[in-house]
Amino acid sequence: MSGTLILVRHGQSEWNLKNLFTGWRDPGLTEKGHEEAKEAGRKLKALGFKPDIAFTSALSRAQVTCDHILHELGQDGLKTIRDQALNERDYGDLSGLNKDDAREKWGEEQVHIWRRSYDTPPPGGESLKDTGARVWPYFLHDILPHVLRGETVLVAAHGNSLRSLVMALDGLSGDEIVKMEIGTGVPIIYRLNADSTVASKEILED
Ligand SMILES: O=C(O)[C@@H](CO)OP(=O)(O)O
């Protein structure tokens, strides 16, 4: 067995609440979102987790979530690396549009394909496959070596950047990933084997 990888999607953002496609836009967290992030930190603390390093995206909702978690853990100031490789999937022309308005305009099925399919990009944006093509190499090169050294690594990122990571870690197919959702502020704990395969996975839901 090697180390531990803790994945957390940011708490609820202002645009999650308003039901807008967000992607690379940069809204802040709602009150509920701040609370979800703190609660994630409290859950991790109760279980005795103590990250050695943290990674987050270039977007504030993930960075603030990361800060809240580290604060709850009593680890303010822990080395934290911010990189846009962990950003949310770029929603292209859909960014800023209301998801219900989009369903009315293009139909329920088309919008679901843009939101959840593996390889169909939204207009002008990234598919989950495109997202994985930047998340996975970054994970392999920058994050995984820490886990394989036996460290505990916190990654605070986004629904779809984390879906692409979970897809690769769990070996899910393009069909299986369609049904997979990641909740805001819900930690996912992976223990990895020395050969980087998954030894165990636990989702810290309420
Ligand atoms: O708008 C977004 O960027 C994402 C995550 O909030 O939305 P969806 O769940 O529709 O992929």
Image (tube, grey):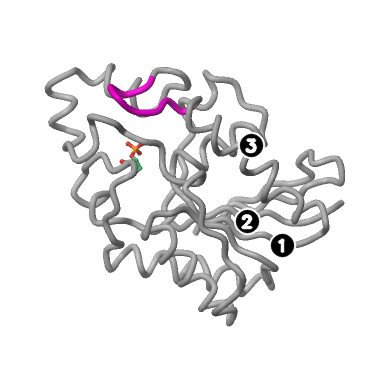
Query: Which disc number belongs to residue 131?
Result: none
User: Which numbered disc flags the more N-terminal residue, 1 or 2?
Assistant: 2
Determine whether label 1 and label 2 are within 8 Å by CB.
Answer: yes
Residue closest to the far bottom: 74
Q: Is residue 125 magenta?
A: yes
Q: Does residue 69 lie above or below 104 as drawn?
A: below
Q: Residue at x 12, y 21 (%)?
A: 105
Specify the amino acid type for callout 1. Thr
Task: Residue under label 2, please give it.
Answer: 6
Specify the amino acid type for callout 2. Ile
Task: Residue under label 3, please give it.
Answer: 137
Q: Nearer the viewer, residue 131 or 30?
A: 131
Q: Is residue 92 left or right of residue 103?
A: right
Q: Main secondary structure of the magenta part?
A: loop
Q: Can you tell which of label 1 and label 3 is closer to the viewer? A: 3
Q: Could you tell me which secondary element the residue under label 1 belongs to?
A: strand
Task: Residue under label 1, please give it.
Answer: 152
Residue range of the region highlighted in magenta in the rendering: 121-128
Q: Is residue 44 magenta?
A: no
- Percent across and percent down for residue 203 are 59, 51
- Percent across and percent down for residue 57 are 47, 53
Q: CA distance from mark 1 to mark 2?
A: 7 Å
Q: CA distance from mark 2 to mark 3?
A: 18 Å
- Percent across and percent down for residue 26 are 29, 53
Specify the amino acid type for callout 3. Pro
Q: Does residue 6 lie above or below 172 as drawn?
A: below
